[in-house]
Image (spheres, rainbow, N blue to C red):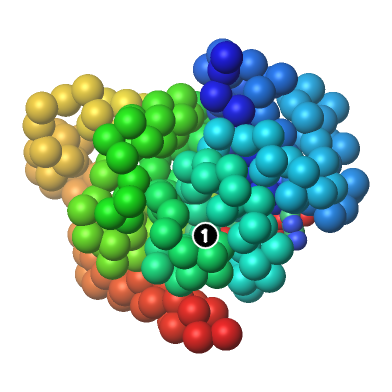
């Protein structure tokens, strides 16, 4: 029988993973999503044909894998409500919440449990996600494989062996799509200032990002060399890139990503002691 996966929460991240799983051939009948609100459940049910349930406990009672996909701020309440069914059923637990560490989650769920922490990103929706995974000591090799298979269905998987590194994963890929979306906004605005229709500037910017990512992934050359290949000496790209360097792009990225990881640590401290 297919592995039965229950998502607690049916928001942006859960829907992205569910959409990607179905796209990659996972049977909708083996997936359930929960939410206290039908407003979140109706769209995922209609779009993907999965089971939905407003009762978390009933949905977990049938599950082999439980993906905890609610906001970190309500995770304690959700976990405590699930502790008894989880202790009975003992599914593999996968938390996608930023910050919250495995020890805290395990304690909220009643202790002695196999927990995988996963930091995914929303491009999972189109099968192009990037997830960092960490397993606590109770996760078996078989369960690691299961978590890998689940998340590989929606994109790239990278395991980290030290839990704090998930905050770095959050800074690179969990929050990363937003950096690129911001870049698209900025490139579109600048393209419009240079006279292009907004739609044309947007489509050119996105296709360029896609092309650059595909090319860099297919190449054995480092990004620096690929960049230099675009920069003809004395040409246009050199002028643009030196403006970005003068403006401190690298330092700005370093600072933004440090802030991101710091916020994940703060959230863990704030929420863990509740
Ligand atoms: N949005 C993103 O790009 C990413 C989000 N995450 C993590 O994913 C988690 C969810 O984030 P989003 O999907 O963005 O939030 P969201 O607000 O879109 O979704 C949260 C979902 O939880 C449901 N919910 C609320 N109370 C509940 C309860 N008591 N029982 C069951 N479901 C309940 C809501 O109805 C909603 O469906 C967070 O912990 C976040 O840190 C991780 C990586 C990326
Ligand atoms: O912004 C957040 O807190 C979540 C975690 C990573 C992406 N979105």
Q: Nearer the viewer, residue 149 or 247?
A: 149
Secondary structure of residue under mark 1: loop
To which quarter of the image does residue 66 belong? top right
Residue name at image x 21 percent, y 53 percent: 161
Q: Look at the picture and state if 220 lies above or below 27.
A: below
User: Would residue 168 be seen by someone viewing this image from the given angle?
Assistant: no
- The x, y position of residue 111, in whole percent, is 47, 64
Residue name at image x 16 percent, y 35 percent: 226
Q: Nearer the viewer, residue 162 or 109?
A: 109
Residue name at image x 80 percent, y 36 percent: 52
The residue carrying pointer 1 sits among few (fewer than 14), some (14 to 19) or many (20 or more) residues within 10 Å by Cα, namely many
Q: Nearer the viewer, residue 139 or 205?
A: 139
To which quarter of the image does residue 193 belong? bottom right
- The x, y position of residue 3, in whole percent, is 55, 24
Look at the numbered disc 1 and say if its residue's Cβ is closer than 8 Å to ligand 1.
yes
Please identify the residue farthest to the front as the structure is shown: 88
Q: Nearer the viewer, residue 96 or 12?
A: 96
Q: Is residue 204 left or right of residue 48?
A: left
User: Which quarter of the rendering shows the N terminus?
Assistant: top right
Residue name at image x 23 percent, y 31 percent: 216
User: Would residue 50 be seen by someone viewing this image from the given angle?
Assistant: yes
- The x, y position of residue 26, in whole percent, is 58, 18
User: Which quarter of the rendering shows the C terminus?
Assistant: bottom right
- The x, y position of residue 48, in whole percent, is 74, 24
Q: Look at the picture and state if 243 lies above or below 125.
A: below
Q: Is residue 147 left or right of residue 192?
A: left
Q: Which residue is denoted by mark 1 in the rendering?
A: 97
- Label count reads 1
């Amino acid at each position: 029988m297919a592995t039965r996966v229950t998502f607690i929460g049916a928001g942006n991240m859960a829907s992205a993973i569910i959409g990607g799983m179905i796209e990659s051939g996972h049977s909708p009948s083996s997936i359930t999503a929960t939410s206290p609100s039908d407003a979140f459940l109706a769209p995922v049910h209609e779009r993907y044909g999965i089971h939905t349930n407003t009762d978390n406990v009933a949905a977990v009672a049938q599950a082999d894998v439980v993906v905890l996909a609610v906001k970190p701020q309500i995770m304690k309440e959700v976990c405590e409500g699930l502790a008894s069914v989880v202790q009975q059923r003992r599914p593999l637990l996968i938390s996608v919440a930023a910050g919250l560490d495995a020890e805290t989650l395990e304690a909220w769920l009643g202790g002695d449990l196999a927990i995988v922490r996963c930091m995914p990103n929303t491009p999972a929706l189109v099968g192009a996600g990037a997830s960092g995974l960490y397993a606590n000591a109770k996760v078996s090799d078989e369960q690691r494989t299961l978590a890998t298979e689940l998340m590989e269905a929606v994109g790239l998987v990278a395991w980290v062996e030290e839990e704090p590194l998930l905050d770095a994963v959050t800074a690179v890929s969990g929050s990363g799509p937003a950096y690129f979306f911001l870049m698209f906004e900025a490139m579109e605005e600048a393209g419009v200032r240079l006279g292009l229709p907004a739609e044309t500037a947007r489509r050119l910017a996105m296709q360029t990002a896609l092309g650059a990512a595909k090319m860099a992934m297919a190449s054995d050359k480092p990004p620096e060399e690929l960049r230099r290949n675009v920069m003809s000496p004395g040409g246009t790209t050199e002028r643009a890139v030196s403006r970005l360097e003068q403006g401190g792009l690298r330092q700005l990225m370093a600072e933004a990503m440090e802030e991101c990881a710091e916020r994940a640590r703060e959230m863990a401290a704030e929420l863990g002691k509740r």
